[in-house]
Amino acid sequence: MSSVVKAVGVAGVFKDIDPRVRIITASLLAIVVVSLSSFLALGSALAGAFVVFTITFAQGGMGAALKKVLAMDAFIFLVLIILPFSTPGTPLFSIGEWVASEEGLFKAIAIAMKANIAVMLLLSQVGTIEPVTMGHALHRLKVPAKLIHLLLFTLRYLNVLHEEYSRMRTAMKIRGFRPGTNLHTYKSFGYLLGMMLVRSLERSERIYGAMKCRGFRGQFFLFDEEKIDLNDMVYGSAALFALGAIIALEVGYVSYV
Amino acid sequence: MSPMFDLENIHFSYPQRPPILSGVSLQLYPDERLCLTGHNGTGKSTLLQLMVGLLQPTSGDISAFGKIRKEEKDFLEVRKAAGFVFQDPDDQLFCPTVLEDVAFGPLNLGKSKDEVLSIVDKTLLSLGLSEFKDRITHKLSGGEKRLVALATVLAMEPQVLLLDEPTTNLDEETTEKLIGILLDLPQSMIIVSHDPHFRRRIATRMVQLRAGVVIEPQSKCKHAV
């Protein structure tokens, strides 16, 4: 059975590193990277992130992961193009009446680098954690239980709902439904959405009934006894070292603004 | 022998609909595997839900394990002792992993973590599901889900099992496996089933729900019971 929400791929050599350590270090690095302003630090971080990204997906999944990075790049492309023209400063070149500034260009490049570093790090280190494992890891990181269970219920039933949706779409298709720009299409999709909502409500009632039958009284339980081992510590230290190096480069270098 | 469940003249109707049950009387005795049949929409699932208090009858008495049960708090005890296996395993299995799902019931009963873990191991082993322990529930196949759903209920060590269409969507092999499991279980059961061959293998007694009441049916087909 396929899953709607799933990990980007297997984390290669990092797959046995405790997800908690991966989540914390990747988040720390991402936070530091987005606040960098020196190109030396950014460049080093980009190189580092690219290496980590390559190692992670070396055994497979590189194509899919790269596609996701490119998708993000396409998304911010427009902003990057506009930025040099919308930032005042030393003129660099002009197209007609529009003048591109040096400051704007540097800003655009910095944003592109930051975004790619963050996405490569998170995709390779956090994106490769199975969603359910992620829920457990967040639970152990003391994220509120309500949020965790919201996440886990969503993961559990998104798939069921998606299958229900696919079945209904197929049923529409085999009766000759072809979406177009007309009232019939809007109406049919309206019915589809409405039916999904009704079915979801009914299902939620059945699930709650089943939970009550097993003595549910408002309390949830999760099992996880994973311990931090030597590998996790080595990984964590390496990440912290990288973090320190990036900050040192940043502090010791003249900023671009 | 006193019945484990004793339903007396149960009436029930869903809001704004004609009555679905109009005077059902039904007893379940120890060691019985009682098969309940009836056409679609005759209220078989409704009847099971009434027995564990998920629905309240408009009139009539439900007594379970020797006591009359009326309110929600009366049924808390009933639900511990009567395990309900839902028709759609996707309704029953809501936890991320099989381990957590099977552990959910016993943990609700207030058992300690160690106790629960050993119950889970024991239950999964008895159903031949040990290797499924760390699997993610929504990634199981239909047959696997059904057996795990049964495990989640058996882990609570109930005295009675209520099974709503346990063989729907199962292939022959899994149905065979389920029959073997059910015949080996010590619990008395009420089984709603449309499958005459399954009923023939499993039932010690059979009743039919027709026009809102329970009747003892006359067999038309020589293969059916």
Image: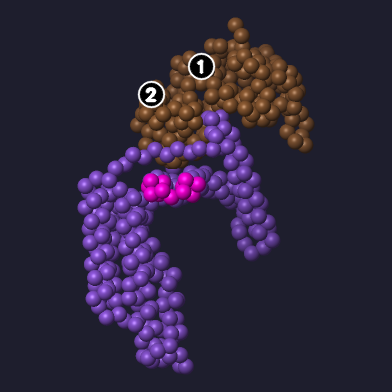
Chain colours: A purple, B brown
Point out which mark residue B122 bears. Answer: 2
Q: x, y (%) of residue B55?
A: 67, 30
The dot on residue B187 is 1
Is residue B151 among the parts visible in the rendering?
no
Dot 2 alpha-carbon crowd within 10 angstroms: few under 14, some 14 to 19, many 20 or more: some
The percent position of residue A118, horizontal first and vertical second, equals 35, 65
> Which kind of residue does numbered mark 2 sit on?
Lys
Which corner quadrant of the image does residue B189 belong to? top right
Please, is residue A142 above or below residue B124 in the view? below
Q: CA distance from mark 1 to mark 2?
A: 17 Å
Asked if residue B63 shows in the view, the reply is yes
Quadrant where the image shows the N terminus of chain A: top left
Based on the picture, tell me whether residue A145 belongs to the magenta stretch: yes
Q: Point out the residue furthest to the top here.
A: B1
* Label placed on residue A105: none
Which image quarter is the C terminus of chain A in? bottom left
Q: Residue at x 27, y 81 (%)?
A: A254
Q: With respect to residue A194, does A88 lie above or below?
A: below
The chain under label 1 reads B
Q: Amino acid at mark 1?
A: Gln
Magenta range is A137-148
